[in-house]
Each structure stands twice: as structure tokens, then as C-alpha cells.
Amino acid sequence: MKLVLPNPGLDLRIPDYNDLERMDKEEAADRPKWDNKAQYILTCVGFCIGIGNVWRFPYLCQSHGGGAFLIPYLILLVLEGMPLLLMEFAIGQRLRKGSVGVWRAINPYLTGVGIASMLVSLLIGLYYNTLIAWIMWYLFNSFQEPLPWTQCPLNENRTGYIPECQQSSTVDYYFYRVTLDTTTSIAESGGIHWPMVVCLLAAWTFICACYIRGISTSGKAVYVTAILPYIVLAIFLIRGLTLKGAMNGVKFLFTPNVEELMNPTTWLDAGAQVFYAFSLAWGGLISFSSYNPVHNNCKQDAVILSAITGLTSIYAATVTYTIIGFRASEKYDNCISQNIRTLLNTFNLPEDSITETNYDSAYKHLNSTYPDIVLGLDIQICDMQKLLNEGVEGTGLAFIVFTEAITKMPGSPVWSVLFFVMLLCLGLSTLFGNIEGVVVPLKDLNVLPKKWPQEALTGVTCAFAFIISLLFAQQSGLYWVTLFDNFAGSVPLLTIGLFEMIAVVYIYGIDRFNEDIQFMIGHKPSIFWQASWRFFSPVIILVILVFYLVTQAQQELTYLVWDPNSDKFPVLASVPYPSWINAVIFLLAGVPSLVVPFYALCRLVYVTCKQKEQQNDKISHVP
Amino acid sequence: MLEKIILLLCCSCAVAQHLCTPDASDGYKVRLSIKTALEGQAYEWNENEMFLFRATLAFAMRNHIREQKFEVSNIIVCNETPRVSFWFVVTSPESTSVLIGKEDVEEAVRKSRNRINSAFLLTDKTLEFIGILPTLAAPVDPDTPPWLIVFGVVMGIVGAGIILLLVSSVVQKKRKNEMTDDEENCEETRVKTVENGSVGEGVYNMSFSDDERFTQM
């Protein structure tokens, strides 16, 4: 297909092959570069494997048909994720610039794509680091026995526990009240919760220290942050498999339900998950690839990274569900014991008469003999499936389900420390890519002076981001984080990804791109890549984007609140957003997406004005 | 004479039984869960254990009301079930038809709860006095929150790391500046000796490459 939009002056803006060869040989000192290939691969792996692999993928897998979900996930991984990945790697390696520089080089009107990437990276980085702050809080509090989330505080006359804690659970109370001190709605800010400020400070200082000299410091840090999670997952896998009920969880996760494949939401969720899992359109991957030597085999890298991401997702899901299975099993046993105790106490039967094995028959017998009394006893129905379904996703999984499960393991502080160190490493390695996607464009756009040393750039960016993220240290911070998670990290990324594909395929020119890849790695990409870049990937992204917008527009915007006074407490109540939230959502999702056409328009206006001025000058100079 | 004594005893027993009934206003229900607490080492509940219970309770009453000397016979038990639960009332040592009030019994049990529990190798949960809530142990609350200590350690290390990196980069720059001063002196002599057309000795000057090719906004 020869469909390429006219793009004058492209050759003047990008280095040609001779320049690239020369740059490769001379090893220019002003541009940072990787110490070795392993650092690059580990940084990319760390960037792609984030907290979402632990707490989003297992939930999606289990709720969309278990083992059957792997089919759309793997198909879309190959058709959508891998081509976009190679495209970002190759364009970065070829044009040797960060995200703003690359799009500006392809066409100055496209600089908006780079700016949008930077804005999205900034917004995501703000709330992501808040999650890291919460993880750090839990990590700092894990160095004590017993763990603080195993106990409820007592009420005034010391005869019982605080009602909020009594009605929900110790872990719920610890997360919502002690850690966050949540208000009941996003409109009530409630003031700053100072332990959170302290943790945010720790988080931003930590990331600043790791990235202070750019990739020369973060490249060393990834040796720990990218490899440690795998080790900890292995330890948890072994521990998890030896726990009672673990296999229930794993079976529940992977039991295939092939009918779910007919449901379009399954495919949409799989596509969205692949897109976010690869951290595409953040700008970080382009930046990282631009530090590679010119003849680095980026195609191999893309395939390796896709394989690692897919396998890690499945691995993390297995570990997560062994723990969830253990927790469900414990809760089920507790439920049955409680019922047995109630029955024994009411009917004054000897202790051993009802055990777990004969519970059902004994219950039926008692129910038929004394139905009225049994009815008044409020016997709970213990349903293992329902308990397994309480798997939950997101912050609920890490801070409530997992912390509860850990308290039941012997030696809980050790497991707690290990778990939260793993989450910390997963989050940090993603943040490195994030910060890269913010600092480098700021430098390219001359917002930060180029003369400043890397340390100053990192320091200023981190300080600025810390001040903005104090928004999340409020008592309503949890709701803000959820808002950002839902809107800043969804539509803008899909839009930018779409624009990127169009830019490379139709404005830069797919033929030129193929030649570049042939120059860099020695052979042209095969028909699979051609078909995906030209057709499959853009279509898939477009379909996901349209469906997402349509479903969002149809739903009323609601969110879940922690309200001790609501009827359904301790289940989170679903409450509609206040009307001013629409403005915030527009800022989060609309502004980055619209920056692309807006910038092109502004530039068009500016250029036409300048041309008119020049023409006027020429006319006035004609004698 | 003998018949009178027997009659008196029977009467007193009957009266005693009359005092102890389930849901008595001054009585409490007790429930023991021996098998749950002790599993393999559980003992059988028999008359001797009941005697121990009555003796322990008399001890508790004596501890609480110091003036009166309670005996085992003052603790009356009834309505024993296979669950091992029963009701008890406490009579006054001075007159066996008068019951000690609920509040006093509750206070006595509360004070000596630990001793009563340990006599039976049980806990507050497995030896229940229905209606007397155990005072819960306060949660462990250290003076300095441990998390501040860990936070302090981590921030100290991170801060030291940042300072180290900054200092080392400043030192490196100073060294580089000194070296480039030396190099510039050498370069001037070298450039002069380059012949026309020979590229070997010259130093490629990066400032004239790529950046200028990018169109500015």
C-alpha cells in the first residue's frame, strides 16, 4: 500500500544512515546509553511488569471465564501488543530521541502526540506513586509482631471493640480508617492526613534517588527492582501451595468457561489489559530504546518482552489465587465452626456431637425437629464459591484480602515484609519508565533548561510532583486515586496509541520504516508485522476505544465509598459522583487526548500568520 | 431424732433447688468448651470437676466480700446439660435462703476471672459466664510507633545516597574541567598539524551535527 501523506522536509529533520553509523562508532558522550543489553531488557521488563499484573490480571482472568480468558489475552498480546511494542522500540532506536523529539522529527505538527504522552505519564505517575506511598506505609508497619491490622482498638469501657471495626473487619478498619482516614465522599476533603504526607515524601524521595542521574542510576536499581519480584513470587508460590485450600483457588482461577469467549466484553477487557500491561503510549519505551546502539535487534526484544509479560501475568495470577484459595478456605472453616458452635450452645449437645463431617446431616435433623428455634438462630450459609469470588481486584486485593491471608500464616511479619517489598519493586520499576516519559519531554520542550544537570531536572520534577500529589494525601485521597485510575489511564492512552500508529504508518511511511528496520537489524519485518501495523493493531485499538467511550457515556458515573452509616456497611456503597467531577474528568481524559489535534491547529495558525507576515514584508520591500 | 435431721436436710435441699432455676434473677449460666480448648488432653467433666468449680467460685466470693466466709455449700448448681453448661446461684453464708445479688457475683467473678480460668486450664472464650463480658486485653501499643523507626532508617539511607551521588557528580565535574583544560592546550597544537584531507588526527566536533536539523517551533 502506497498510502502515505505528504511530509516535506522529513529528511532534514532526522539523521540519515551515515549519521547513524557515525554516531554508533563515535559513542557520543552527551547522550546516555545502557551499560549492557541486560540492563535495557530488565528496565523494559520492569516497566511492563507492574502492580497491575498482580492485582488486575488475576481478577480479569477469573471473572471472564478462567482458563478460557488466556485465549483472547494471548491472541491480542500477539496481534495488538507486540506490533505496537516493536514500533515504539524501532522508532526510538532509529530517531534517537525521546517521545517529543521523535514525533517532532516525523512532523512538527505531530509534537502534540509527544506532549500528550508526557501529560498522561505525569497524571499516571502522580497516582501511581500514591499507591507506592500506601505500600510503603504497610511495609514500614510490617516490622512488628503482632501486625497492627490483626487487632481492633477497644471502645471506652473496654468491653468491646469500636463499632466500625466490629462490623467490618480488622483489615478493613486498618486500611480505611488508620491508613487513610477516609471520608464518606469525594467532595468532603477532610484535611491532610499527615502519615500519608510522610509516606508520599518517602516515595518521591526514593524515586528521585533512584533516577537522580537518569538511566545510569536507575539502570543499576533495576537489577534489584526487576528481579526481586520474581524471587518473591517463587517463595510465595511454594508457601502458597503448602497452605490448605490453595488448590481450590488455582482450580477456580483456571477452570475454563468457554461460553465467556462469546461475550464481547471479554475480548475488550483482554485488549485493554494488553495495552496497559505493555505501558504503550507512555513515551518511556521510546526514550529507553533511543539509548540503544543503532544495530540492536529490536524485533527480538519485542518478541522476548511480549513472551515475558504474558508468562509473568500467568505466573503472578497463579500465586495470587493460591493465597485467595487459602483465605476462602479459612473463612469457610470459620463459618462452619461458628454455625456448629451456635447449634451446640442452643441445643446443649455435647461438644463432639456435631463436627464438620456430619454438619449437614445434623443441621437437617435439627431443622426438621425444631424448625422455629433454628430459624431464629441466624445460621449463616457457608458458600465456598462465593468466598472465592470475593477475590476482588485493585487496592482491595493487596491491602485487604492479602493482608488478611498473611495474618493467618505462621510468621506473618516476614511474609508481610516480603509481599510489600515485592509490590514496592514492581511499582518502582514501572515508575522509572514513567519519570523518563516526563523528564525527557520536558527537556525537549525547553520547559526545563537544557543546561541543567540531570540531577537538577530529576529533583525539580519530583519536588513539583510531590506538591501536586498532596491532593491524594487528603482524607478523600482514595476516591481521587480511583478517579485518576479510571480516567487518566484509559481513554488518553488508547487515543495516543492510535495516533502513534497512524503517524508511523501513514505519515512517516511504512516503506521507509521497513527500510529503517532492515538497516538496523539486517532484514525486513515479515508479512505478519506488515499486516498488523497497517490493519490489525489500529483496528483493534479503534474498536476498544469506541466501545469504551460508548459504554462510559451510557453509564451513570458512580463510585464506591466507605460509609459506616450506610445500610450495606461494610460493603462499599455505590454513590453517584457530584456534578463538578465532569470538569475534572475532562481535564484528566479529554485534555491529553485533545492536545494532539489542538497543537496541530495552533501550529497551523501560527505558521499561516508567519507566512502572511513574511509575504507582507516582501511586498513592502519591493521597490 | 434421726428422722428430724434427715427431714431437715431434705427440706434444705429442696429449698436450695428451689433457689436455683434457669433464668434465675440472681443466677448466671456457665458454659465450658473443654474439648475445643484442650483437644487431645481434654478431661472428663464429672462430679469432682463440679466440686472444683464450686470451690473456686466460693474462693472468688470470699475474695470479693471479705467479711463473709463462703463455703462450697453456698454455691448451688442446677440444670446441668451434656454440653457442659449449667446455672448457679450463690447463697449468703449467714442465711441459706438469701441469694447474693447479681452485681456482687459479677464483680467477684470479674476480679478472679484469671484464677477461675487457670483452675480449669481454660480461657475467657472457653469458660463462658453468660452475661459477664470479659474485659478485653488492650491491643499492644508501643510508645514510639515502630513504623517511624523504619521510616527514619530508610529515609536516612536514601538521603545519604542522594548526597553521595550529588557530591560524587560535583567532584567528577571538577576533575573533568581540569582535564579539559589540559586537553584544550593539546588540541590547539594537534589541530595545527593536521594536513589537508587527512581525517585521522582531527577531533570530530559534535556541536555541528544533528540538533540544528530539527525545525524549531
Image (cartoon, coloured by chain):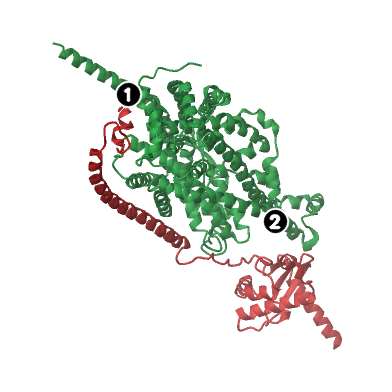
Q: Please give the residue where the numbered disc 2 appears in the rendered image.
A: A338
> Any idea which chain is the red one in this picture?
B
Q: Please give the residue where the numbered disc 1 appears in the rendered image.
A: A603
On the same chain, marks 1 and 2? The answer is yes
**Which amino acid lies under the numbered mark 1 shown in the image of this protein?**
Arg
- Residue A227 to residue A504: above or below: below
A306, B18: nearer the viewer: A306
Measured as percent of width and height from the top left, residue B132 is found at: 63, 67
First-in-chain label (1 vs 2): 2
**Which amino acid lies under the numbered mark 2 shown in the image of this protein?**
Gln
Measured as percent of width and height from the top left, residue B32 is found at: 72, 67
Helix, strand or loop for disc 2: helix
Question: Quarter holding the C terminus of chain A?
Answer: top left
Helix, strand or loop for disc 1: helix
- Residue B136 to residue B8: above or below: above
View extreme (left): residue:
A623
- Give the residue at x 38% y 56%: B159
B48, A504: nearer the viewer: A504
> Does residue A115 appear in this view?
no
